[in-house]
Image: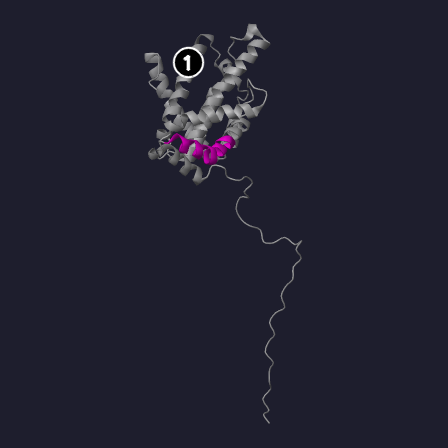
Amino acid sequence: MSNKLKYAPTPPPEPVITSSLEPGPKKRGRKRTKKQYFTPDTDLAIAEYLSSSNQDERDNIFATRIHYPFYKLAENLIHTFKFYYTEVDDLEDLKHEVICFLLEKLDYFKPEKGTKAFSYFSIVGKNYLILYNNNNYKKKKQKADPLAADEDEGVLHQLGRDERKQEIKDFIDYFTEYIDKHMFTMFKKDKDRRVCDAINVLFKRRENLEIFNKKALYIYIREMTEVDTPIITKVTKILKKQYKKLYIEYTETGYVRV
């Protein structure tokens, strides 16, 4: 009989049973709160729509794969930028008008140039709503106070020199039109273009703008674009340089070559 001690094998550790109420490990990264509505299939659908010459096929592609992304885009633009001066009682009617306008502009979109459909149609829709909103604001202002209908308000009062108000107003109209046309050439990155577009929107809505503090404007732009302040500063410097260049051209010729 052997005198060697026999060791029993070490039993496996008992499984740890956790309550379903106990929180699991935290996941890193930003929590997704909204379902993406402008998807790669939307880009593909737009490309198929543009390449088709059959109207029935086009109608089907738009109804089944493009209409909903356009609807959500219109909805987000209206509420994000507060385009609430309307001629309609129901915002659903305004969304429909925006969708119709985007449909009219579909054939103008050129995906072969490398432009993202979401960026393009966001800018197109926003520009439409800016003009629509501003025109209705003026109508409401005229009804409320006809004597004050022609007064310059907002940022223009900060200029302090009455004789230059109209000149600056006309130039800024040229400037915003120029930025709309050349934005995708001036800025290659999507974040930069978002900031540029947000600043341009503020220029267009300057008569209704009630924020004059630089810090407050930066915060406002950051909330609109969800980008960091350094990017806003970089884009602002580029736009400021372009502003000065175009203003010299305007004072010498009376217009800006858009």
Which quadrant holds the N terminus?
bottom right
Q: Residue furthest bottom?
A: 1
Secondary structure of the residue carrying tag 1 is helix
Q: What's the residue at 40%, 24% (across, down)?
A: 180
Instruction: Residue 85 in the image: state x and y as whole percent.
Output: 55, 19
Residue 17, position in %: x, y? 65, 62
- Expressed as whole percent of the image width and height from the top left, the position of residue 125 reads 46, 26
Would you say 119 lies left or right of 248 here? right
Residue extent of the magenta highlight: 54-72
State the quadrant of the C terminus.
Answer: top left
| Left/right of residue 70 with respect to residue 246 in the rendered view | right
Membership of 69 in magenta stretch: yes
Q: Is residue 177 above or below residue 167?
A: below
Residue at the disc numbered 1: 170
Residue in the foreground of this view, choosing between 157 and 188: 188
The three-letter code of the residue at mark 1 reads Asp
Residue 87 is covered by the magenta coloring? no
Residue 174 visible? The answer is yes
Q: Position of residue 139 (x, y in %)?
A: 54, 12
Please tell me whether the stretch drawn in magenta is mainly helix, strand or loop: helix
